[in-house]
Amino acid sequence: MTGFGTGSLQLTDEERAMADGSDGEAVAAAMDLLVRYGEILGAERLVETDNVCGATIFGPRHSRVLGTSDPVALFSEFALNADHPVDVPPVRAHSCQLIGPRDRELWELQGLSEETNKEITVSEDYLASRGVSILSTCTPYQVGNVPARGEHCAWMESSAVPYINSVLGARTNTEGRESAAAAMLTGRIPYAGLHLPENRLATHLVRLDVPVESVFDWSVLGYFLGWHLRDEIPVIEGIAGPVDPVAIKQFGAAANSSGDVELYHIPGVTAEAASVEQALGGREPVDELRFTRADVDRVVEHLNSTATGDEIDFVMIGCPHAALSQVREVARLLEGRRIDPGVTFWVFTPSALREVARRNGWVEIIERAGGRVMADTCPAIGQFVPPGARRFATDSAKQVHYLPPIMGIEGRFGDTEACVRAALTGRWEA
Ligand code: F3S
């Protein structure tokens, strides 16, 4: 290994060669970025990764800043921090695009112009031509990207990171767009943070004074933990038996919205700790938290606090992107019914799952009721709501946390049935 830069980060000979330009200018820029980033993190070395999930599709928001919609220039500026456009070679690591700004089929529903759609398509096609899989979802683990336990990954996205760290036992920090892009090109990421086993032990013990069973319960618990723990690592005691995969998906998303919980342990459920003691690594917890009925009430009240009334004109399901079972559930609840004409009803799911839902007839059932099943994007990331929407309902603690401040809309939070009921009646009754 050879030293590089002013810090203590050491590069292997192969990494040094990449930094010196053996694989071209873009890879050298990526290595330079990783070295600077690693030194800030206090990493002593990089670690190989062959699983990177990033977000490097660009559209008008970026081209306006740069004054060009050339995909090479946009990638160089916003993904690589390069000081001039550099064309990128095929990615070295298996890489995929997380959620993007628009639905490739239903972009008109988002209110996008044809020109905007074209620009995003060019950017997406550029990425695809470099070998990035265009999964376009915040839940790659639902559509084929399931990292192995212990695998070093470089993923972005606040709901995906806790899922693969905790449920799957893979190892990632929450990467940014630039570090993920650099990891795609080099197959490396700083060996720091949650890549190190000693940083993965629980710090806080959580005891449950109320049953936590439904998807709704898990969402509320997640939000509560993020509120209180910020970026600490909880171990939750007292969960017997398997947990609904949808519940665990919503739980992690909520915990990493109100706070920064990137990893949690639930003995018997998550990958790394079979017992509370093992999760804590034999240490005493820094603190203990109890989750009580009063906490449930406080969280639910908070998540409904932007709403000044009960009329609903928009319902959003699928944050994080809905599992097939969720799409099926929505279709079951809507079958033979009509959504209130004053309500826009959108379900978001990965495009691969939308295709399966189509084959099963669920998309048709939802459409017959007046709803739409969308893919590749979501209102918070794409920054869109139906025209004139003032108050929405969702079963996602994460979406109701983010959408009101992003889009200036009021939000209601409840379970899926409550949201479908609101869609049918135009009123919140939970
Ligand atoms: Fe996914 Fe958008 Fe929610 S990225 S987790 S659907 S805010």
Image (cartoon, rainbow, N blue to C red):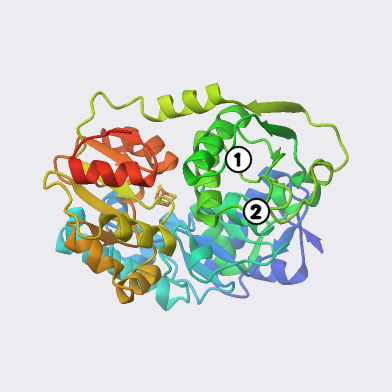
User: Residue lying farthest front?
Assistant: 336
| Dot 1 amino acid type | Val
Residue 290: x %, y % from top left: 66, 26
Residue 329 shown left or right of residue 273 in the figure: left
Q: CA distance from mark 1 to mark 2?
A: 10 Å
Residue 231: x %, y % from top left: 63, 36
Residue 294: x %, y % from top left: 53, 21
The quadrant of the rendering that contains the C terminus is top left
User: What number is the disc on residue 261?
Assistant: 1
What residue is drawn where x is 28% and y is 50%? 61
Q: Answer above or below: position of 412 versus 75.
A: above
User: In terms of depth relative to the viewer, which is nearer, 35 or 286?
Assistant: 286
Q: Which corner quadrant of the image does residue 204 belong to?
A: top right
User: In terms of depth relative to the viewer, which is nearer, 72 or 128?
Assistant: 128
Q: Answer above or below: position of 210 versus 36.
A: above
What residue is drawn where x is 20% and y is 62%? 367
Find disc 2 in the rendering and name its residue: 165
